[in-house]
Amino acid sequence: MKSLIKLVFGKKYSYPAPLKVTAKDKTFIWTLLIGFIVSMVVVPYPSIAMWVGFIFAGYAAIANDSIQTIGTFIASNSDKKWYWLWLFLGSIFVATVGYSWVVYGGDVTHQRLSAKGFEVAPTSFHYLQLIAPLLLLMLTRLKMPVSTTFLLLSSFATTSGIGSALFKSLSGYVLAFVLGFLVFIIISKLTVRCLKDKASEWWTPIQWSVSGLLWSIWLMQDAANIAVYLPRSLNVFEFLAFTSIIVIGLGVLLWKRGGKIQQLVTEKSIVTDVRAATMIDFLYCIILFYFKLYSKVPMSTTWVFIGLLGGREVAMAVWKSANNGFMGTLKLVSKDVLYAGIGLTVSILIAVMVNDNVSLSDISIQFTNQLNKLIKL
């Protein structure tokens, strides 16, 4: 076991390692304990439980998924005041979900929750459904790029919903990895050479525009992870509560500069440069938009993102322009996949324990059916 851990993570991740608990860690642990207790108290009362679950999910999902959409944005704008970033991203959030709410009759998810297996709002809650976001926060604290789609949505889905989302997500990883590798194997040498010079001032508005577009498209995909606890059609007061809570949580996240999981982005090669960050965001934006048009089935954008970063890192390592060397790059890519895989396993186990109609064999059959459809195309 020790040899396997060292092979995948390197010597600094060797086991056993000394456990250091800081004051912030203690605060985090107490917060989790309070969350577990609150969830236990409110679970018999659906009208209260749905908002408690939503609040937990809202912060947990954005804290974990910030690496995908605004991770490079935060990393390359570390010199900017956090509240300017908050005002920019908060405005886009309100505009994106507000458009969906108006056009789709109270639905803030751009019809992602109208897909088969997710279309019915919960009328009662299981304890595991309420604490799923807390488990996500724990994994996020460990810097694991966990799929919020699986960890949060899976506990509410039918078998068909989980199988379809699983297939779409894993195919997204493969597509993003291949595309990231092909694009950066072509431009990585040129990129490294060009990035030696200081970026022109025009790159900042370009990056903000691309990051804003990416943030909006990501919300069209992943707002379902947050809103799954709520009615499928929100009234005015529910919509105001929904937007206010998320905007406040977003402000806390930006104030903390993304939290510990931000290291997943900053440990990659040349991501703090505004030009490199813009190229990553633009490519990621194209992939997400393609999958938005592909089907209404929710998917894990986390798997798409780590696939894109992984393909990019491998391409740069091939040209020896990566920060970590070829073996170091393989360890980084393996670590990201392993962490995401742990989250996927936990998510499916939660779904099986919560839903009587969901079994591992049924999920496997549904996934295989989706694969066969692709092969026949």
Image: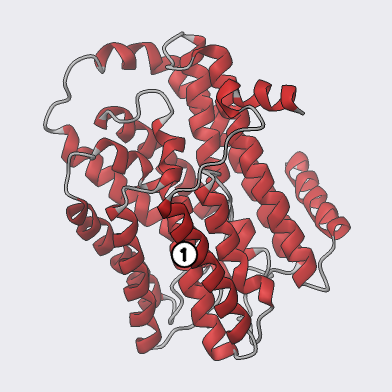
Looking at the image, can residue 298 be seen? no
Residue in the foreground of this view, choosing between 168 and 201: 201
Q: Quadrant of the C terminus?
A: top right
Q: Is residue 280 above or below residue 104?
A: above
Q: Position of residue 52 (x, y in %)?
A: 50, 78
Q: Name, please, the residue furthest toward the left.
A: 201
Taking the spot 32% from the left edge, 14% from the top edge, the residue there is 192
Taking the spot 58% from the left edge, 49% from the top edge, the residue there is 146
Q: Quadrant of the N terminus?
A: top right
Q: Position of residue 313 (x, y in %)?
A: 49, 23
Looking at the image, can residue 277 be seen? yes
Residue in the foreground of this view, choosing between 332 and 142: 142
> Circle 1 — which element?
helix
Quadrant in the rendering for residue 183: top left
Name the residue tied to disc 1: 223
Taking the spot 67% from the left edge, 43% from the top edge, the residue there is 341
